[in-house]
Amino acid sequence: MISDKPESCPDATNPAVAPVGFRPLYRQVKDAFIKRMADGLWPPGFLLPSESVLAGEIGVSQGTVRKALDELAAENLVVRQQGKGTFVAQHDEKRILFQFFKLVRDDGIPRFPESQVLAAEVAEASAAECAGLDIEPGARVARVRRVRFIDGDPLIVETLSLPDAIFPGITEGEVPNSLYAYYSSRYGVTIAFAREKLKAIVLSPEDAAILGRPAGHPALQVSRVALALDGRAVEWRVSLCLTDDAHYSASMR
């Protein structure tokens, strides 16, 4: 049984693990591991040292390291592969599909959507974008508007707002379909968590025309703030989803 009582305190002079108030030791170790990911010391796909090596390096028990890694695995930040070791998770299509894309056809079979960019620009952030991204008035954002298809049918029209200071040049050239993988590979920004709000709405004439529905047709609005490993809000996405023959699917535990 792993105890939450610290068997020793991490060395405050060691940047790997610094004291962080009164919290279980394994959570301090977990935060230290997340910082290594955020700082690029452990990039996506990186094979972590063994639990015994990490424990010796940090100065804690192997059980404490294991408990920290257990939480990271539960949050899909690391992936354990039998016989190979523990790796920093990558934003491949399978992970994105099951962790972040929640619109599913009523047959229950998950499908990865295709996208068509309608517009992309860099502009001064609106008041709503400043609030969503927690940025100062006057800051600039990259704004991408696109429609997403499942089985060739347009089911989602969405607008993404990104801090231009974090993603310079993202609107120049082709905007890829799998953005979270692109954030990681080009900008070193890994999406770790997201907060969502759901609301029933009716479509405006413009959005309805894009989705092939009459104005006033019902839709589900999903507003998502995506957070990087260090807790920064790095994307605000507002998706308008048709649910005529699809539904929003989420798992809870």
Image (tube, rainbow, N blue to C red):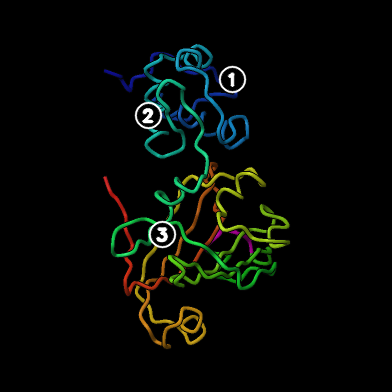
Viewer-nearest residue: 120 or 225: 120
The magenta stretch spans residue 237: no
Name the residue beneath numbered marker 2: 70
Q: Which residues are magenta?
A: 132-136
Determine whether the residue tagged by mark 1 lies in a helix, strand or loop. Answer: loop
x%, y% of residue 116? 57, 68
Residue type, label 1: Asn
Q: Earlier in the sequence, mark 2 or mark 1?
A: 1
Q: Residue at x 56, y 64 (%)?
A: 160
Determine whether the residue tagged by mark 3 lies in a helix, strand or loop. Answer: strand
x%, y% of residue 6? 38, 18
Dot 2 surroundings within 10 Å: few (below 14), some, or many (20 or more)? some
Q: Which mark is residue 196?
A: 3
Dot 1 surroundings within 10 Å: few (below 14), some, or many (20 or more)? few
Q: Is residue 49 above or below residue 130?
A: above
x%, y% of residue 146? 56, 69
Viewer-nearest residue: 70 or 81: 81
Spatial separation of the CA atoms under disc 3 and disc 1: 36 Å
Residue type, label 3: Glu
Determine whether the residue tagged by mark 2 lies in a helix, strand or loop. Answer: helix
Q: Earlier in the sequence, mark 3 or mark 1?
A: 1
Q: Residue at x 45, y 56 (%)?
A: 112
**Quarter where residue 12 is shown:** top right
Q: Main secondary structure of the magenta part?
A: loop
Viewer-nearest residue: 134 or 245: 245
Name the residue beneath numbered marker 1: 14
Nearer the camera: disc 3 or disc 1: 3
